[in-house]
Image (cartoon, rainbow, N blue to C red):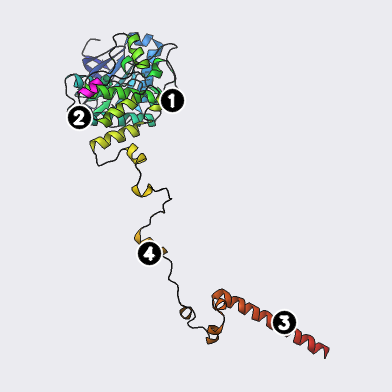
Amino acid sequence: MELPARIGKYELQEFLGGGMSHVYRAQDTVLGRTVALKILTEAGVLDQESKARFLLEARMASNIQHDNIISVYDFGEENGRPFIVMEFLRGESLRAAIKEKHTGDLGNKIRIANQIGRALEYIHARKIVHRDIKPENVHVDTVGKVKLMDFGIAKSEGLSLTRAGFTLGTPYYMAPEQVLGQSVTYLVDVYAFGVLLYELLAGVKPISGDTVERIFNQILYEPLNIEPLRAVGVTPPLFDLILRCTAKQPAQRPQGFGIVCGELEALIDPAKPSTMQRQTTMNPQQTSTRPTQPTMPSQMQQQVQPRPATRPSQDLEGLPGFVSMLPAPLRTQTGLIALAGLMTLLMIIVLYLVLSFAKII
């Protein structure tokens, strides 16, 4: 497309790149703001599945609002070619930031990873699986704010657009179950995040195959190469997190990004315990095999303290003096009630006998 060009109210000013869809820096002539406009190519329009996937991305992304996910402002169609209008991001891709060593120190790298994790936690809560987590799909602006991008092959629960025998996703970041064409769950994003975290920290990919067959063989059968992590001095908690995220069995991975981000945030702020620590740390008072009693605030303890026993003379103040001469069991409230009942019964019997005797006379 020759520039400048116009699509609706958007004036295309610069071609930014793309494959089956092209991305342009554009100007919204009504609102006067710079945007990124992504439009499906003519070849993409002819491919019904590519078109369906593009439209799915437009609808899906337009319903997502999160600080760490690119915002979609508008979408439509021009001469049969669908387009998406997004916020224009300044900065660079995480791929470029890693290559140029712009990711900063260890603390800053963890902050980048945590922002990605929170974005993924958000979409997973909405039953969306991204399926293509990689540095190219993460943008880092000039102040270190992260934006997750490209929902082109994202999958909603219950939706399948994948051709039979065709696996989607970038090979280096694909989970074993993706490689095998098995059912995809949110745990494929956990795996890809682990690979991305490895690369963010070590500066290199954990998988080095130069053919798809070699890459898939490493993903399925070979253990993670840990030497690059050791070489840069990755701390044991991060090392452990990467190994768990990239476990070949989905059940062995962290079962959500709430857990992952909890651990990352505990590394950023050591005073804040991670989710795992909160779940596994036991109170020293609970190490005894005896069941412990629940503790109560001191004010409540005062309220439930048993009342000291009182002397009989204190309990009997104000009662007739003869009561003090009764046996101890009868000097209680229950005893007095029973005694009164017995006396009433005797009086009734006596009265009955008197009346009966009077009739006989």
Q: Are marks 3 and 1 in contact (CB under 8 Å)?
A: no
Residue at which label 3 appears = 349
Rendered location of residue 101, percent (x, y): 16, 22
Q: CA separation, marks 3 and 1?
A: 84 Å
Nearest the viewer among 347 and 234 is 234
Which quarter shows the C terminus? Answer: bottom right
Amino acid, disc 4: Gln
Rendered location of residue 341, percent (x, y): 63, 77
Residue at which label 4 appears = 302
Amino acid, disc 3: Ile
- Does label 4 or label 2 sit earlier along the sequence? 2
Amino acid, disc 1: Glu
Q: Secondary structure at mark 2?
A: helix
Q: Residues within 10 Å of mark 4 (few under 14, many from 20)?
A: few
Q: Residue at x 72, y 84 (%)?
A: 350
Which quarter shows the N terminus? Answer: top left
Q: Quadrant of residue 45?
A: top left
Q: Residues within 10 Å of mark 1 (few under 14, many from 20)?
A: few
Q: Quadrant of residue 203?
A: top left
Amino acid, disc 2: Leu
Residue at which label 2 appears = 106
- From the viewer's perspective, is 341 left or right of 39? right
Q: Which residues are magenta?
A: 223-231
Residue at which label 1 appears = 157
Q: Residue at x 29, y 18 (%)?
A: 38
